[in-house]
């Protein structure tokens, strides 16, 4: 098991007490790190965007640099200490202490297996508002749901696992048969512990409950299926992580909501109602760190049928309201459990549309909204140059960064209103080259930008993964750059 060192920021905050702070004009010892290589310039334009107790640090690229090292002033040791090494010109830092925090950055060049440190930047000061100052902010941005999204940190999906649909398995299939049907290994406690040790604080578990469900119109979920979900949820909660469970694609029955046949449409609502009544009752005593999500991407276009867009939005709003009402009615911890409301198609622009409405709720400040981010689709989804609707093999232009920021800023309307924002899925497909899978150029920049913007705006972003990025068999990252971003 990987053992993580306690970050210097936490040590500093714990040891600080009421000790007066002297701004660190000096106190930087190059002897504590690799000796400086004078040929590399100090990074310029070093700045910070602060959001609560987190900040995104950024600087200009240095010619010849292979990586960058961030240093933070340790107020107890009265010197700058090594915080992290990254390969991009942006990084996020969390858990900052109230008051002034100081940082420097240096460019690194690689010599064999070691990094040599170049000239070090001027320090910057990152000021974190006190609790009293923070309380003066708007009630929306200060809501419990908004705060929760920030606490959830970086998240990961257990993709192609419990949402796998495999009709070929037959009546004797077990929950673990479905779990492994789409190529993923059996989920273990050690696997989840490794995810936590690799930097993730939240796990989304998509579920296809219909895999083992009665076909008599009562929609009774198999106790054995519940048992397996219980085990996986338990692994996550035992590691003090947040866990999201939902009703995923689930074989595609969602389209019945949009049927012109009223009986078919009503049967879809009956099934949805029966499922959430069972799920909510089953988990009513579970920790508040277990979050229910109303739906997946299917809620929207897949439930539209021949309806107008206005009618489709109304149907989506009604389904989400039904979800909240069902969960709250089951009592126990569900009276105040945090609930994740799926946006229209989980698409940012469609969810930010004024026709999408968040449900009414008897609990105050306990709703979050879920969207996904696979934009541009020609980069994130198209895996072949021959793709009929376009293909992009790279990402990272100035226009790309501006577009992503503009997209993410659309969700501020929800945080301003007191709703937490979860980017429930994001990712980039690997390019298929014959039997080989090749990572697209700029994937690292895309992931880093999602993380940085989420940290800046107070969202929780959850990478979609089917062992493409975090290998569940080896319980390690497939690419080193992922360590720089998440670990």
Image: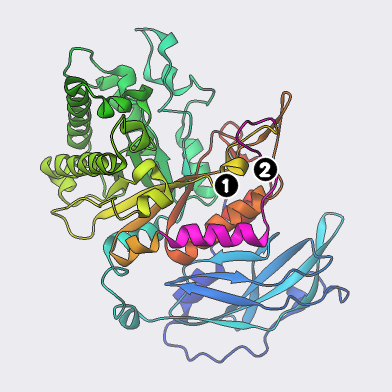
Q: Does residue 33 show up?
A: no
Picture quarter with the N terminus:
top right
Residue 97 spot, x, y in % from top left: 45, 76
Residue hosting label 2: 392
Please provide the residue range marked out in magenta: 386-410
Q: Which mark is residue 205?
A: none
Q: Is residue 286 magenta?
A: no
Residue in the image at 69% along x and 30% along y: 386
Q: Is residue 393 magenta?
A: yes
Disc 1 and disc 2 in contact, CB within 8 angstroms: yes
Residue in the image at 61% along x and 52% along y: 446
Q: Which mark is residue 376?
A: 1
Q: Quadrant of residue 57?
A: bottom right
Residue 232 spot, x, y in % from top left: 38, 34
Q: Quadrant of residue 62?
A: bottom right
Q: Residues within 10 Å of mark 1 (few under 14, many from 20)?
A: some
Distance from disc 1 to disc 2, alpha carbons, whole Å, reads 9 Å
Picture quarter with the C terminus:
bottom right
Q: Label 1: state its secondary structure.
A: loop
Residue in the image at 27% along x and 41% along y: 316
> Is 256 situated left or right of 57 in this image?
left
């Amino acid at each position: 098991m990987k053992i993580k060192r306690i970050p210097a920021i936490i040590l500093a905050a714990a040891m600080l007490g009421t000790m007066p702070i002297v701004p660190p004009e000096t106190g930087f010892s190059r002897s504590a790190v690799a000796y400086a290589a004078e040929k590399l310039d100090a990074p310029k334009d070093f700045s910070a965007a602060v959001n609560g107790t987190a900040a995104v640090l950024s600087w200009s690229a240095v010619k010849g640099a292979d990586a960058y090292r961030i240093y933070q002033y340790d107020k107890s040791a009265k010197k700058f200490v090594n915080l992290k090494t990254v390969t991009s010109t942006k990084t996020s830092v969390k858990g900052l202490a109230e008051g002034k925090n100081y940082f420097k950055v240096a460019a690194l060049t690689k010599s064999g297996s070691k990094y040599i440190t170049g000239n070090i930047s001027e320090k910057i000061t990152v000021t974190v508002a006190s609790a009293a100052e923070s309380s003066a902010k708007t009630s929306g941005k200060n809501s419990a749901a908004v705060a929760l999204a920030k606490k959830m940190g970086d998240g990961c999906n257990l993709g192609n696992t419990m949402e796998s649909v495999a009709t070929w398995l037959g009546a004797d299939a077990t929950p673990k048969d479905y779990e492994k049907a789409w190529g993923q290994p059996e989920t273990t406690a050690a696997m989840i512990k490794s995810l936590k040790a690799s930097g993730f604080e939240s796990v989304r578990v998509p579920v296809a409950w219909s895999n083992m469900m009665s076909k008599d119109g009562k929609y009774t979920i198999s106790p054995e299926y519940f048992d397996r979900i219980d085990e996986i949820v338990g692994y996550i909660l035992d590691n003090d992580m947040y866990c999201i469970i939902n009703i995923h694609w689930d074989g595609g029955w969602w389209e019945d909501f949009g049927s012109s046949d009223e009986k078919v449409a009503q049967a879809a609502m009956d099934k949805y109602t029966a499922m959430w009544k069972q799920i909510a009752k089953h988990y009513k005593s579970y920790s508040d760190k277990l979050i229910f999500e109303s739906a997946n991407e299917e809620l929207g276009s897949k439930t539209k049928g021949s309806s107008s867009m206005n009618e489709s939005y109304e149907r989506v709003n009604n389904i989400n309201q039904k979800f909240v009402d069902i969960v709250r009615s089951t009592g126990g911890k569900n009276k105040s459990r945090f609930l994740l409301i799926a946006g229209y198609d989980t698409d940012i622009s469609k969810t930010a549309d004024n026709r999408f409405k968040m449900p009414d709720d008897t609990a105050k400040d306990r709703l979050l909204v879920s969207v996904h981010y696979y934009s541009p689709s020609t980069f994130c989804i198209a895996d072949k140059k021959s793709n009929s609707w376009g293909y992009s093999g790279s990402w990272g232009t100035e226009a790309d960064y501006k577009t992503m920021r503009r997209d993410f800023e659309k969700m501020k309307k929800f945080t301003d209103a007191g709703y937490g924002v979860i980017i429930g899925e994001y990712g980039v497909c690997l390019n298929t080259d014959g039997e080989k899978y090749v990572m697209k150029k700029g994937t690292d920049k895309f992931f880093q930008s999602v993380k940085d913007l989420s940290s800046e705006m107070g969202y929780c972003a959850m990478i979609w993964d089917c062992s493409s990025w975090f290998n569940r068999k080896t319980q390690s990252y497939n690419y080193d750059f992922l360590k720089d971003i998440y670990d």
